[in-house]
Image: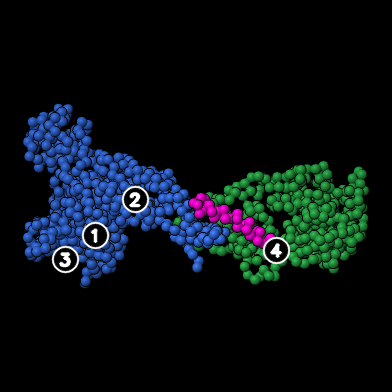
Amino acid sequence: MSMSHLYTSKVDQKIRIAITEKLRYRFLELAKAVLSGEEPKMIIPKRTLSNTVYDKERKLLLLGSETFERRFLDVREVRKFMQTLLMAKIIYEALKNNEYPTIRDLYYRGKHTIRYRSFKKSIEEENTWDEQKESDAVLRDIEVYVGLLREDMLILSKEKGKVVGDLRIRSGDDVIDLSKMGHGAYAIEPTPDLIEFLDVNAELVLVVEKDAVFQQLHRAGFWKKYRAILVTSAGQPDRATRRFVRRLNEELKLPVYILTDADPYGWYIYSVFKIGSITLSYESERLATPNAKFLGVSMTDIFGDKNKKPYLSEEERRNFIIKAKKADIKRAQELLNYEWFKTEKWMKEINIFLEKQSKLEIEALTGKGLYFLMDTYIPTKIQTGDFID
Amino acid sequence: MAVTILEKFKSISPAEFFYRNKEIAGFSNPARALYQSVRELVENAFDATDGHGILPNIEISIDRHPEKLNVYRITVKDNGIGIPGEYIPEAFGKVLFSSKYVLRQSRGLFGLGAKMVVLYGQITVGEPAEIISATIGSKKVYMYRIAIDIKENKPIILHKAFWINTTNWHGTIVRVSIEGDWGRAKQKILDYVRRTAIVTPYANIVFKTPDGDVYVYPSVTNKVPPPPKETKPHPHGVDIEMLKAMISETKAETLLDFLASEFQGVGEVTAQRFLQTYGFDPSKKVKELTAEEIEKFVKCLKEYNEFKKPRADHLSPIGAELIKIGLKQILKPEFVEAVTCKPVVYEGHALIVEVGIGYGGSIPPSDQPIILRYANKIPLLYDEKSDVSWKVVSENIDWKYYEIEFPAPIAILVHVCGTKIPYKGVGKESIADVPVIEKEIEEGIRYVARALKQYLLKKQREEEALRKAYTIIKYIPEIASALSIFASANPEKIDQKIFEAKLFEMVKSKYGEVLKNISSVRDVVIQSE
């Protein structure tokens, strides 16, 4: 190990040693098999829709019990077998060298050309992998095979999520006060499990899909006034943001409300926060926040119903509503098939959408007035329990 | 056919007849004449060697005449049985119509051979032919320079010499100058020599062209097919002319004796029964038969079904083994197969069809199989599309059934041998589609094509296994490298090479046989360092 570790954080150093051993131990099994003349094989849980199970009790999308064998002597699997070992090797070496590779780094490090003579004697060339899609796929296989998430293996990704609020944390060797971020915000680090919560003064967590709305609420002092931790995922939430929100809920016992656009994409963002995503169902156990609530914007907020007055006037509706596109309709119909959307409230929500064929962005509410959103819409919804669980 | 035309020309000398009808003998233009001359001399050379069980050593050379334009000197040297000195002038200087009725499978098409070449050379150039020869065991070597007296049909000896045969040499050297066209004959002659080499893999052939190129076809086996034997005619294969010739030569007196002694497979009992059936008098003097009686006799001979079938033991097929050796040596294919079919009867003559097949290797892919046709071991180069073999190959056989998709690198050899071959046209360059021959050729081709199909299917299976094995092997270094890193402190370092060897062993034990030519991963993966 180089001197570089002198400057890395203690928490990184600690986890690095544990993870390196765990990774090595798992792949050492394959080396031992080969040395004793047995065909090396990995038994890996399947990451397919058919092996994604919705656990109704825990309200989580989980990986099922189906597995597949990736064997060395299987002609259809041997390339992936090689890629998996190559990826494991690169990660292992990065861990040992005190590095923090990104998935792009891993892609470049592993990509090289194999030159060989074909059985017809011609010289052929083949890359270990061509596109990042391939290296990403085997990385996911390693996560489920070893039982370690990429964050655990100190693989970094772009920071996307942001947070502000009356909360102090330790990140690395530093204490950070999230109430003293000025006009900016704390970018949620890619390894949120290495964050330590020190003390908190808040009653709720509000997650906003749109970064612009987050900034408006931050500058208007929403989190101070309503004792909230304000988070944005800036679109589809990355893993770090999801894990961070989950910890706020689980460890600090704060209720989580999610505010997205009123369209199928907004709903899906909510469901990723709440129960997990299909492609990453193996991480739901740690990333999902089953208690998260969909605050809005809901169809009844726009159109009202028999017990509820809409938040928008007839004229505002005319100005703000966007006609749903074909893709939106199709997506909504798909959502109807997902087990976790088959609740009374969601069926009603989706059916209104299909009937009206209309959608609405959160910005429509700030368009009506920032303080309408901050002081009327959000508090009323929370106080009256007007959300979908 | 030639015989009936000849009837009308009884009054002129045979030499003159052939001079007037030279295109019949294949001398229609300078290119064709050059080709035909080489053929006649080479075929004589073979008849003098393998026709007598001698491993042939044949040297052919064509030189441009030092002074005369479009004149070529052809020299063919063999190590055959040689010609006794006193017979040399007649053998090369007198054109004869064979009256012999014994049948023998031989190469010569007209029984004229070298004489026609000498005659043609004399007409077009006018230089004497030179013949040097010694028989086996002869104490002397004889040399003659001769010309032909066309009107009188006899040799003119211009020079004569002999010397002591100190080296015990035997064989014949013939040198003739003729007018020719090498430029246009070149390809045919090269083809001819090459195709001859295919069916005579036991021969050493050296061919020197006027361009100075030397083609050497070394012998690759010392197995010579047994020489063809003479045989008596079968009753079904006799025509009026032939019967007349037989009667004039026979020593038998009565019809019964004649029938029982001069025909193949006919003994006293059969002869008696035949004569009785058709009401001939067994004691009638055979030489006293009238023209009408001869005509009736021939008709009855053809009609009678109780004769034994014609025998084929006098024929000399090349044999499947030699065909395979020849195809392999000259075409360098990856697969070869051949078959000699059972003898069949065509118009009272036994006939044997042989078929060979070559696939892949150096054979160039083409849209049709390359057909190598032979009749009595002579390559047939002209009129391919009117030959029965062409019909069978291109019409009767569905090659897809045999796993062949054209263009494909495939050559088919068809050899028809027999004492009577149904040629098409006067050039004798193609065989007519007689049903019995067509059927034999088709069966022969199907036989070798089936063998090819088996081979191709096996090859496909092996290639598939090989492809799979290579797919795995090419990743071994990468896998071994990762494994050695994970095993690096366990407790001591384990080299990547050990993992490579272990993984390679696994692939080898799974795919076994097909990997016999690979000894390590490094035979497949090329190291980048």
> Marks 2/4: CA distance?
70 Å
* Contact flag, marks 2 and 3 (Cβ < 8 Å): no
Secondary structure beneath label 2: strand
Task: Point out residue A250 in the picture as x, y percentages from the top left corner.
Answer: 79, 52
Identify the residue under disc 4.
A12
Tag 4 subunit: A
Q: Nearer the viewer, mark 2 or mark 4?
A: 4
Query: Residue A74 in magenta?
Result: no
Task: Point out residue B330 in the picture as x, y percentages from the top left corner.
Answer: 31, 57
- x 72%, y 63%: residue: A11
Q: Is residue A129 found left or right of A100 in the rendered image?
A: left
The range drawn in magenta is A12-39
Q: Nearer the viewer, mark 4 or mark 1?
A: 4
> Marks 2/3: CA distance?
46 Å
Identify the residue under disc 2.
B336
Q: Is residue B272 visible?
A: yes
